[in-house]
Amino acid sequence: MEHQAKFEKPWYEDGLRFSCTRCGNCCRGPGYVWVDDAEVELLANHFELSYDQFCKMYTRKIGKNRSLRDQANEDCIFFDQQSGCLVYNVRPIQCRTWPFWPRNLQSPEDWKTTQKRCPGSDHGELFTLEQITSRLQQMKKSK
């Protein structure tokens, strides 16, 4: 008798709502914004800098990886209290996929924790399971 693997659908199989309010809560505080070469190139072009110039000014090496620098208050280097994200249109994949990160989707409780931090979570546009899965895959590829 052959055993077929049963794949359980995730708890968010009916989708989740999200609409970015540009509050900046995801940009504040300590952490890393990982960037790959293509993202660095895109950001460098945005500022009309060379790849090397951009890296020296705005990134830091963490082991073999590269992250955007923090401001003195530990906010993202590109977060401005008045204007929000200064690179919103060319922001890295990590930023584009928020709040659909693995740690936020592990359980309904984790999603509720995300909602406390992010006012756009559970409001606005309905993201389907397929759209959420796509964002999760983008996150995995970018690491």
Image (cartoon, rainbow, N blue to C red):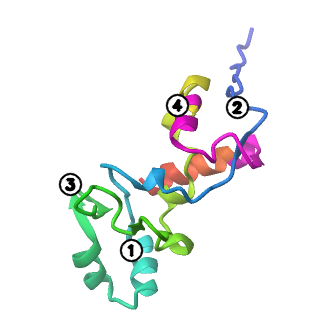
- Residue under circle 4? 113
- Residue under circle 1? 40
Locate the N terminus and report the quarter of the image it occupies.
top right
Q: Nearer the viewer, mark 4 or mark 3?
A: 4
Q: Is residue 16 magenta?
A: no
Instruction: Give the mark nearest the N terminus, 4 or 3.
Output: 3
**Residue density around tag 4, few if under 14, some if 14–19, many if 20 or more, within 10 Å:** few
What is the residue that sits farthest to the top in this orientation? 1
Residue numbers of the magenta segment: 112-131
Instruction: Give the mark nearest the N terminus, 3 or 2.
Output: 2
> Looking at the image, do the residues carrying marks 1 and 4 touch, with CB atoms under 8 Å apart?
no
How far apart are the two marked residues, 3 and 2, measured between alpha carbons? 34 Å
Amino acid bearing label 1 = Val
Q: Nearer the viewer, residue 10 or 84?
A: 84
How far apart are the two marked residues, 1 and 4, measured between alpha carbons? 31 Å
- Residue under circle 2? 12
Question: Residue 28's spot in the image, x, y percent?
Answer: 38, 53
> Looking at the image, do the residues carrying marks 1 and 3 touch, with CB atoms under 8 Å apart?
no
**Residue density around tag 1, few if under 14, some if 14–19, many if 20 or more, within 10 Å:** many
- Residue 34 appears in which quarter of the rendering? bottom left
